[in-house]
Each structure stands twice: as structure tokens, then as C-alpha cells.
Amino acid sequence: MLVLIVFGRYGEMQGLYQVWQRDLGEEAQLVLEHTSALADGGLVKILSPRADKGQSALWLAEYLGLASTDIVGLGDWLNDIPLFERAALSIAPANAFPEIKDLADYVSPYDVEHDFFAHELSRLIENRPHNTCR
């Protein structure tokens, strides 16, 4: 089963949730949640038994009008291999499965139990070029 997680401001995630619920219909299950990873943060989880994370990242990039070179993959387990293969940048936590750490472009000093996702998302947002703000 695929689980793709998209982070952003909660209000934006509510909008995406509603659009994707309409567009995806029965193809996937969607979950909308608050998250403390970002100020006023929200996330949408997309679950589908017929897709992998790599396919979903490509679909999401196309849906949002982004290039595949804009895909950043964060993951810690073998089900993240397709995502890492399609991502322009792949980031693994310190406690990732060894094969994932070998595939990663960057291995974080943080692990999943110590806010890996929050630290790395914050770092990516702080260091993004100003012309990529959407």
C-alpha cells in the first residue's frame, strides 16, 4: 500500500484535500491532519493499494504543474526506493534501513524518532531559492 504525505499550511491542505477527494474518487483514500512539523501545519495522506511512492510523486508533480526535478523524497524504508529513484533529491534519516541510506543523496543526522521530517522540511524551506515560492 502506498502512503504519500504532502505537507503545507493547514488551509492549503484543506483545499488540496477537497480537490483530490473530488478528482481521485475511489482510486485512493485521503486523510487530512494537523501537524506540528510546520507552523499552522497540515498534511494530506494519500493511500492507494495500486501505486508506489515514485509513481505518486510524479503524478503529484504533474498535477501541481511542477517539474520532476522539483521532487524531494524523504524516506526510511524499502517502500521508499521507487520515490528515491524518481526524486531529484533524496533524504534519509540517521536510522534508515541501510539500503535506503546507500541510495540517499543526503543522510540526516536526525532520526525518525527525533523529528527527522520536521528538521529536514524546515531546512529545505529555509534554503529554497526565493523564485520557487509558490
Image: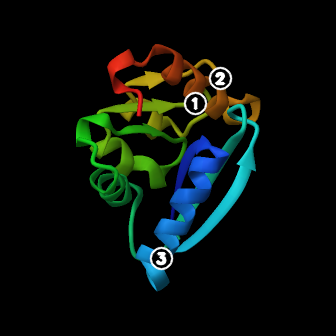
The residue to which callout 3 is attached is 22
- Marks 1,2: beta carbons within 8 A: yes
The outermost residue toward the bottom is 26
Q: Locate residue 98, reporting x and y percent.
A: 50, 35
76 sits to left or right of 41: left
Mark 1 and mark 2: Cα distance apart in space: 6 Å
The residue to which callout 2 is attached is 110
Secondary structure of the residue carrying numbered label 3: helix
Task: Point out the tag, 2 or 3, that comes first from the N-terminus.
Answer: 3
Q: Nearer the viewer, residue 95 or 45?
A: 45
The residue to which callout 1 is attached is 93
Task: Point out the tag, 1 or 2, that comes first from the N-terminus.
Answer: 1
Mark 3 and mark 1: Cα distance apart in space: 34 Å
Residue beneath the point at 38% across and 69% down: 51
Q: Locate residue 113, reporting x and y percent.
A: 75, 35
Circle number at residue 65: none
Under mark 3, the amino acid is Arg
The answer, for residue 49, to whether it is visible in the render is no
Q: Nearer the viewer, mark 3 or mark 1?
A: 3
Task: Point out the tag, 3 or 1, that comes first from the N-terminus.
Answer: 3
> How many numbered marks does the figure carry?
3
